[in-house]
Amino acid sequence: MDFHHALSNASECCSETSTNRHDKQQTETTIVNGEENNCFNGRTTDTPEETKPNLSWGRGIKADWDRTVRTHWWKEMTNLEQKTIPVTIFMFFAAIAPAITFGAIYEKTTGHYIGAVEMLLATAWVGIVHSLIGGSAIMINGGTGPVLAFSAVLYKLSISMDVPFLTLSAWTGLWVMLFSVIAAFINLSKYILLATRFTDEIFSMLISVIFIINAIGSPFSPIGLYYYFDSEHTSHDANENNDGYSFLSVAFLSLVLAVGTTSFAVFLKAIKFARFFCNQWSRTTISDFAVPIAIFSFTAIDHLVFSSAKTETLNVPDTFAPTFACCDATCETYWPNDCTDLAEPFGRRPWLVDLSDLNGHLYIPFFAAIPAFLAFILVFLDNGITLHCISHPSHKLQHGDAYDLNTLIIGIMVGINAMFGMPWLVAATVRSLSHLHALAEKTQDGKFISVLETRLSNLAVHSLILGSIFCLPVLKLIPVPVLYGIFLYMGITSLTNNQFWGRFTMLFMQPSKFPSAAYTDYVSTTSMHKYTGIQLFLFASLYIIKSIKSIAIAFPIVIALCIPIRIYLLPRLFTQAELTLLDSGDENIEKWIEENVDNIDEELVEQGAKKEGSIISK
């Protein structure tokens, strides 16, 4: 069977096992402890509620538009509720802090051509446009580590080829836009639908762990609370000559602010199900405003109680202008590094990139297609898998998905940003999932009841970011340790519903103490740990590759490999029943248990066995 035929068959299987619009269910005979029973096809998946058939040129985009924007736009733009306000405040800090941080890193890795101003402007306009016409009201676009790493590689490539970086970046971005438009028109997103919970969990956990590690202390860059305890850290430079300044005092205060912000937000969030306060409305209100209250409380503590200890603040520019300051009219050298004799810069680089500035290398517009193809894979997979995680059936979203429409819109916005010398923005997984969780109503054990599917919070967040560009000094009032606390909160809360994380913690548990779940009650401990080990290996590979700049460009390839590994390798290592219970949605698992549990119980009685979470064997 050739590859495309196999993918087609797998796609059909995904469609039949994941949507409740189909009446037909494929079943397959499997051996459960020696007896034949019917179960769902082993390649069960957690695809969105509606998978797309093969559509002719461009019809996938129209179908996405009709299913989402055309049908639900007015409701999503008018459903203002109490929850919208605290979610907007929370997500404003969750979006602007990474934007400024990424902007500072971009400036270092791109020779000052892209900085915080460009990142803030790109975040604002991309977010506003996507909130108005994007297919997913909940998705948050922003800077990401893999795209940043790619931009750093592209900058080094421009230096080695003696080509202006912004020109090479612009041509590459235009090619990415072209590839994205083609992908959207040929319905390439059907391959994303082959991704299952197996891939989603790895990708989601990777992004969550990145946020947690960056808050605590990254081993690959001087970012995080750990580095405040280093007297040579750049955060201490501004105050090192001040009398009475103690870097250890600042470090301990920063740790208290960060952990306090996280803990207080978690505590307030849990009040919704507590016995305190006079009624449910007050408990719900406090829970909704948990993160904003935590941010403002510990910011006030920093400024009012410990005002003598100078904690790190956001390093934002003083004015709104392109980051690159020119030494002369050619704007090829950077002030003040390259012209120390000048008291002031000649001016700033123009916003619009000159596509003809090729330094005599006329082949660059065509050569740019090569790195653009790798960038396209990264952008396409990042957007697709993030939307796939958001659209998981357990989240109970009702307004549908729009893979092709999102691919088209984000691809066009990448091209526009490239033309204006701004960073390329893609779906930010943790920020998107944090937005989803903040808008959700949940049970006490964290299961979704419903989600407020609104465009208002997304629109308001990015409108506030746009407004903040014109009052940049105000952002310096926010202590960076408080923002580290928010990163920690986002990373921890996004792990709670990740089955991969739950099974990872079971590696250190006594088997008889495992929590009750389908994969602990009906799958052998050995098979469950083997499945977790495979995910753990891929997770570690992704983290290492992403963190090493010289090979970070291969990051999207490893993500893409997770899909064929699930389709072709895992069925050789696990039974169909095990894959159903480990890698399927709740509805499929419940259906399997309903059809098989009676037979399993009869076998256990006959064997005199005790059910201790080790029933299915190969």
Image (cartoon, helix red, strand yellow):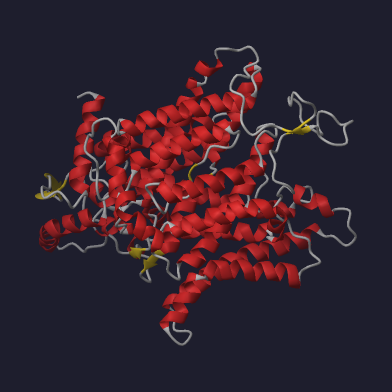
Figure check: 198 above or below 493: above
Front position in the image: 474 or 253: 474
Compared with residue 361, is residue 194 higher up or lower down, i.e. above or below? below
Q: Which residue: 65% across, 51% down?
A: 469
Q: Position of residue 534 (x, y in %)?
A: 38, 42
Q: Would residue 150 be visible to someone looking at this image? A: no
Percent position of residue 333, x then y: 76, 26
* Residue 62: quarter of image: top left
Residue 512: give x, y in percent of width and height: 33, 63
Question: Is the N terminus in the top left, top right, bottom left or bottom right quadrant?
Answer: top left
Q: State which quadrant residue 216 falls in.
A: bottom right
x and y percent of residue 470 in the render?
67, 52
Residue drawn at the location 63% of the way across and 26% of the way down: 165
The residue located at (59%, 53%) in the rendering is: 465
Label count reads 0
Residue 64 vs residue 486: left or right? left
